[in-house]
Amino acid sequence: MKLDAKIPAGPLAQKWDKARFELKLINPANKRKHDIIVVGTGLAGASAAATLAELGYNVKAFCYQDSPRRAHSIAAQGGINAAKNYQNDGDSVFRLFYDTIKGGDFRAREANVYRLAQVSVNIIDQCVAQGVPFAREYGGLLANRSFGGAQVSRTFYARGQTGQQLLLGAYQALSRQIGAGKVKMFPRTEMLDVVIVNGHARGIVVRDMVTGAVSAHAADAVVLATGGYGNVFYLSTNAKGCNVTATWRAYKKGAAFANPCYTQIHPTCIPVSGDHQSKLTLMSESLRNDGRVWAPKKKGDNRAPGDIPEGERDYYLERKYPSFGNLAPRDISSRAAKEACDDGRGVGPGGRGVYLDFADAIKRLGEEGVRERYGNLFDMYEKITGENAYHVPMRIYPAVHYTMGGLWVDYNLMSSVPGLFVLGEANFSDHGANRLGASALMQGLADGYFVIPYTIGDYIATSKQPKVQSTQPEFQQAIAGVADLTRRLLAVNGKRTVNSFHKQLGTLLWEKCGMARDEKGLQAALREIPLLREEFWKNVKVTGQNEELNQTLEHAGRVADFLEFGELLCLDALYRRESCGGHFRTEFQTPDGEALRDDTNFAYVAAWEFAGPGKPPVLNKEPLVYEEVHLSTRSYK
Amino acid sequence: MNLTLKVWRQQNSTSPGRLVTYEAKNVLTDMSFLEMLDVVNEELIAKGEEPIAFDSDCREGICGTCSMVINGVAHGGQKGTTVCQLHMRHFQDGQTIVIEPWRARPFPVLKDLIVDRTAFDRIIQAGGFVSVNTGGAPDGNALPVPKTAAEQAMDAAACIGCGACVAACKNASAMLFVSAKVSHLAHLPQGQAEREQRVLNMVKTMDEAGFGNCTVTGSCEAVCPKEISLDFIAKMNREYGKAILKNTLVRKTKGGD
């Protein structure tokens, strides 16, 4: 496979301008003649579907939820970054770009990240115009707060519900187009395959999740905005329905999967309470603006937190990273929490937790001041744990939260399959090996509002593919393939539940390919996953039938894909013999336990290519060429 | 603890439903209500029976997917809490719990506890937006928004569209949901241009979908997991009244119908 990133020539700051001039246009009257499929209606998908419809294209949008408003972007709490420099504190497009590249441990593509920083300012303007109720100062101007990995305040927010408000903005823009008849919306519909005609992505196969009917849809281009694969770990902060199916099935149709081993473990989540746990809940990183993270200095100290005197507490982030302190980036903070717990200094059930303490903030701001900033988060913590965090410190532990890896895309966000575009968390492009807080919302909306509208037009204008119909053989074959898979899942009729397989896979990956990885563990995982997959296909129990609303069947299809994808995740982690960002190989660390990158051998994007069933995937490398940035050791000390 | 569940089972939207009794054994207080149902479902599947179908997604109280009536109360009666955030520590050993779907004609049951809420989407499509295309928006700070207006808008915008308000209302009224969106945008300068048309269109679509009228009993506010205030319904009534009057005046000056 030849990977051409199509990065425009010229100085970094002028690349996007140059690209926009060179990208071919389609005149407004002709846009009406083209159909585009958008799968997923989170920030990236909803913003793309709305914007493409505004431009005149005929859009079909699909989501598995009962309404496009419920996509998991809605759960993002803390905020969205933008290089507005409203605080006059030294921010700039270049600084946001640099922080993001550095935060990603120099494993992201320079040109994409620079463009992201450039359009970040337009996102805020657009959202304000839509009526997103961002937090304001008394003078009526927009308020900002700080987030991990940055020393400026550039994060815009709407209480602790920024993702919700941004998504509702995009959902409302989408709804306007649905009302106008420019978007046809298919809720409760799951994409199960991509259809390739003459080497180009020309449609999808979907299952109606209420009736079970499988159908095909044809278009001039297909956009996937289907989110990340964090649920391969079973327990994560993702919604229960989040899955890898759309991107995985696209991979099996020729789209390269890039850097799957880059997974983000978020440091501040509510610890696991028992075997019944179905998902984990994030406590926004913004809490680290005012909360102080600590663990007891003494091993096995099971005194109540209030009984542990100041001198016997280890504020380990402040100690190890004095200049960033509690706002050290996520990968670093997570590993530090794991170290404290591995050292026997963890707190709470099973010793898998550390404290996030607001006592000092309450002294400084008063309980009311803290409530105003984080009230909803404290309420949520109390609902889940039954504890009042105004009086006792929160207990937190890292959890899988976001996946930086995803389908490989070029500068135009097109995958290695012509006509198949990938946006948001589903692609790999902007966050390198670690994503900074408040950057996911920025990327999703940048891709959907400000990048895809330009680049998809160029593809349609230049690809010159004939119109296709969903009655063509390629579509009918894809439908038959999907129907066959469903039949096979229902036919196994074994003894074990789908959930038990999912949980076992998740536990395996968390232990062998979680916060810390090593060769031995990864080799073991690569032996165990195929065995588990084999057992799944012999012994899974899927109740009910296809021609009805069948949640067990939906889950079974997703777990079948996770069981294949998990292997690629471990394989990528095994091949990357260095530590960078969220990928920490214990063999490769500095004497003081920090990630040890190997720029000589690993400054590349690993783009895995499907070679056929039962065959090992092929590794393609896109070298990361840095024109502006000097590769340095990431330090937050 | 051990519980007796009486759960509404219904194969699809056309078949009749009924309450079926299940035993939930060894329920832990740290479980969420949905995790308790997950465990019951695992046992049902192991026995080869069909699990109880229910909607949920984020399981952190923000997506608005989960929707069930527990012992007659939408979302189970903990103030400001969706059912996914409701934990078993609020129940007692030996208790019988009746679990039903949202019951309202505009929300037909699809299966067991799952209902079709697309009527809410249609109301938003009728006007719950600001008509600005992507691009060309003025600088975010070009138009100052008083903090109090932004806060009031946010109070209304916090609605998660779960539909509990409809389920709780004896008239199956959607006024709390619709008024939250109308108020959110009416409080902001960006929402002014379409202020009147928005409320007229949204209310019309709401009525056409078959939602009932509001008799201000406040049962919606009582169950709302985001504690959306009844005041917004009053606000919407004012907005609607003004819009009707203004619309009539405009028509008269134009000499129209």
Image: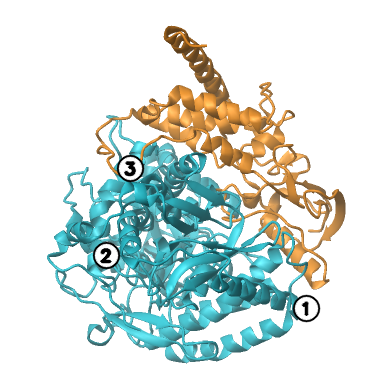
Chain colours: A cyan, B orange
Dot 3 corresponds to which residue?
A126
- Residue at far front of view: A466
Q: Secondary structure at mark 3?
A: helix
Q: Which mark is residue A112?
A: 2
Task: Chain letter for mark 1, please.
Answer: A
Q: Amino acid at mark 2?
A: Asn
Q: Which comes sooner in the sequence, label 2 or label 3?
A: 2
Dividing the image into 4 quarters, which one contains the N terminus of chain A? bottom left
Q: Is residue A241 left or right of residue A440?
A: right
Q: CA distance from mark 2 to mark 3?
A: 20 Å
Dot 1 corresponds to which residue?
A493
Image coordinates for residue B74, horizontal then vertical, percent: 70, 41
Q: Quadrant of residue A528?
A: bottom right
Q: Is residue A198 left or right of residue B133?
A: right
Q: Is residue A141 above or below residue B162?
A: above
Image coordinates for residue A60, horizontal then vertical, percent: 50, 54
